[in-house]
Structure formats: structure tokens, C-alpha cells
Amino acid sequence: MLDIKYIREHTDELKTAIENKGIGLDLNKLLEVDRERVRVIRAVEELKEEKNKLNDEINRTKTADGRVAAIKRGKEVKDKLAELEPLLDKTEAEFKTLMTKVPVIPSPDTPVGKSDADNKEIFRWGEPKKFDFKPKDHIELGKTLDILDLEKGTKVGGFRGYYVKNDGVLLIMGIMMYALKRMVAEGYAPMIPPTLVKDFALYGSGYFKGLEYDPEVDEIYQIATSDKEATGETSKDKKFLIGTAEPSLLAYYSGEVLKAENLPIKICGYSQCYRSEIGSYGKDVKGMYRVHEFMKVEQVIVAEADVEKANKLQDEMTTISGKMHEELGLPYRRMQLCTGDMSPGKYRAFDLEAWLPGMNRWAETGSASNFLDWQARRLNVKYVDRGGDKKYVYLLNNTALPSPRIFIAILENYQTARGTVEVPRVLQEYVGKKEIGSRALG
């Protein structure tokens, strides 16, 4: 969310951003509602001030005529307030709804485009591996090696359900442990955050497209069962499952005022992640490329309100993820997202994509975003700068490593002609062997 004063002063730039990001928002309508909101607020405040003065006048007036006149005017003021206050509530609600759609103006280096087809490749490491045999995809490899069961996953968990088994468990947990230890070595404090959260964390981080949860567009699972409070009463809070550790990590600082000398704060969070994937109907329906639940290690940085510093921190985050791809021996490329592929709150964004030879495609394995103060305003996270002024922090996030797609990438890139899968050197301590399947296949 942006400051309304900033919106009033940057109308033309915001209209361009709205068009380039493909957002359905009439900024003129927002400004019109804002003007009406300000008018009604002033009128209500003036009437309340007059009401207070009239109450004092009634108490002070000694003549009957004076009290009658004051009481009569007081009733008129009360009636007018009864008319304006519902109008103010309505106008405020419309204003807040429109404000949620106002985007951050993208960084100057963000490509202008309509979809992911217009994203720009800015870096590549390694080249797609050439095999002297036809490479299998992860589905066939997982079944042959008895490390993945999609059929029983669907039977038990429904569409997009899966079981990881045997050495596959060691491999996938090894990926998570490797990522977590790597992030700690880079100075990121580890956390295991709650995966069941209140709605404010998801609204604040931008995972609700509007003010409230909308099951038709938000790829979030809501929990139907109500909780009990410590008092034994039924909780009124709505609860949701997170799609990444980002909302939980950011909400950790909600409502707080931090100190500049403690910034930047660098955190990494390990969590189970849940996504309804309602916007991906019909896409990647086979295998575990697009699933409803998975594990991930996420990076988050709470930074000072300095664009140059924030951009450097974002570049640092993507570099760390890139280095992990390199240590895993996975060819990858870094894509800068175009305006049409960015959500409203993003100032600057990148994706990392690994090569999947079995699926014969590049596949997103991480995303790094700089939101400036867009999320901080929603979550009310501030800091006191060195001059003593309070400012909203800048918030950044990035995928360190996700479990399913890195798992897929390793299976498909490290497969052998014998049908086995070699284990990347940095993961061998977790898996306990250099190759998966050699004993089973003789």
C-alpha cells in the first residue's frame, strides 16, 4: 500500500505503472473517492467539535431560552452526524478497497512487457546437459527408483498429491538441510515459523489480492475449523495456511518500531508450504512440478528505506541462491521480471530457472522481490533512522531453495544411462551415498 499523499503527487507515473502492470484500477476514481472522503471527514470532525461546544454551552447556560436553543442545535448536529457517519464508513471502505490495488512504480531497469514471455534473461550459468541416451523425466525416474509414488499420493491426498519414499526422502530433506546451513553461513538467522496464520499476515504481505480473502483468486487455503482461545471461547480469528514462510517472517515484526543500527535484519525460514494453485488449472497436471504442498527455505530482509541499499541486498539474495544452484551443479538462468509479470507491490523482481532435461524446459526454482515499503505499510513495520525520524522499513524476500523443483532438477540432471541418479557432492553427507538406485538395479 502506498501513501495517499504520494499517490496525489505522482498521478501520471502511477497511471503508467497501472497500465504496464495490467492492473484493473481507475486512478481517477480513487482520487475522486479520496476527495469525497476528505470532505466527509472534515465535515464530521467539525460537527463533533460543534457538538462538544454545545454540550459545554448547555452546562454553562443559566437561562431557559439559551438551553433550549443549544439543545435544539445539538439535535440538528446529532441528526447530521447520523447522516454523515454511515457515508464516511462507506467512503472509507471504497477508498481502502481501491488503495489495495495501487501498485509500486517499478524500478527504472524493469523491462516493460505483458507476460512472462517478456521477461529478460540477464545471467546464465552452465549449459543444458547433453546425454548419450534419451533422458527420463522425474516421474519415470521416481517410479523406477521407488522414491516417488504419485498414484497413491493422489489416492490419499487428491489431485497433485504425492509420496516421497526411501532415498528420495533423504535427498529432499538433504536439499532443505543444505539450504538452511548455507543460509546460516551467509549470516541469515534461522527460524521455523508458524504455517497456520491469521489473515493480517497474508493481507500485509500481499497474498490477498484485496482487503480480505477471496477463494476465487487467492491461492491460499483457509482452515474451516475454529480455534479455541486460552479462555475456552471460540476464536473469531480466521486462520490460513501459508504458501511460503514470507508472510510469517514479515509479520513477526508487525506493529514494531526497530532501530536503524539493527538493520538490515536477515532471516531464513524453513516451512511446509500450501498452495491451492487455482490459477494454474490445467497446467503441469502430472508429476510434482506443481503441487499443493511442499517444503521451502525462504530468505527475508528487513532493511532501511534506501533504494540503492535495498537493490544491493536483493542482488545479494539472488547471488546466494545462484551459488547454491552452482554447488548443486544445476544449469540455471536469472530472469528479470517484466512489468506485466509483477504483482502490484513489487518494485523489482527476479526469477531463477533451472534446466530440467527430462521435461526439456527451464523451470522456476526461486523468486526474489523488493517491495520497498509497500508491505511495511500494511504490516506497520517502522524504524527510527539516525536522525530520529520514524520511517517504514523496506522488505525483501527470496527463495533460497524449494524442495520439489530442485528435487526434480537433480533427478533429471544427474540420471545415468544405467537408470540410477548420482547424488551431488554437497548432498552426499545427508543421503549417505553417492548414487541412488545402484543396489536396487544390480
Image: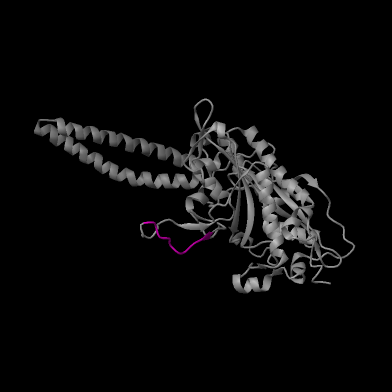
Magenta span contains residue 393: no
**Nearest to the observer: residue 341 or residue 418:** 418
Q: Position of residue 90 (x, y in %)?
A: 39, 47
Q: Is residue 320 above or below residue 329?
A: above
Question: Which quadrant holds the C terminus?
Answer: bottom right
Q: Quadrant of residue 80?
A: top left
Instruction: Determine whether, in the image, residue 236 is placed left or right of residue 413.
Output: left
Residue 105 in sight: yes
**Nearest to the observer: residue 131 or residue 22:** 131
**Nearest to the observer: residue 316 or residue 283:** 316
Instruction: Determine whether, in the image, residue 115 is placed left or right of residue 53.
Output: right
Which residues lie in the magenta part? 221-230
Magenta stretch: helix, strand or loop mostly: loop
**Which residue is at a point 75% across and 46% down the rendered structure image?**
323
Q: Position of residue 408 (x, y in %)?
A: 73, 60
Residue 115 in sight: no
Q: Position of residue 375 (x, y in %)?
A: 54, 43
Magenta span contains residue 227: yes
Q: Quadrant of residue 356?
A: bottom right
**Nearest to the observer: residue 61 or residue 235:** 235
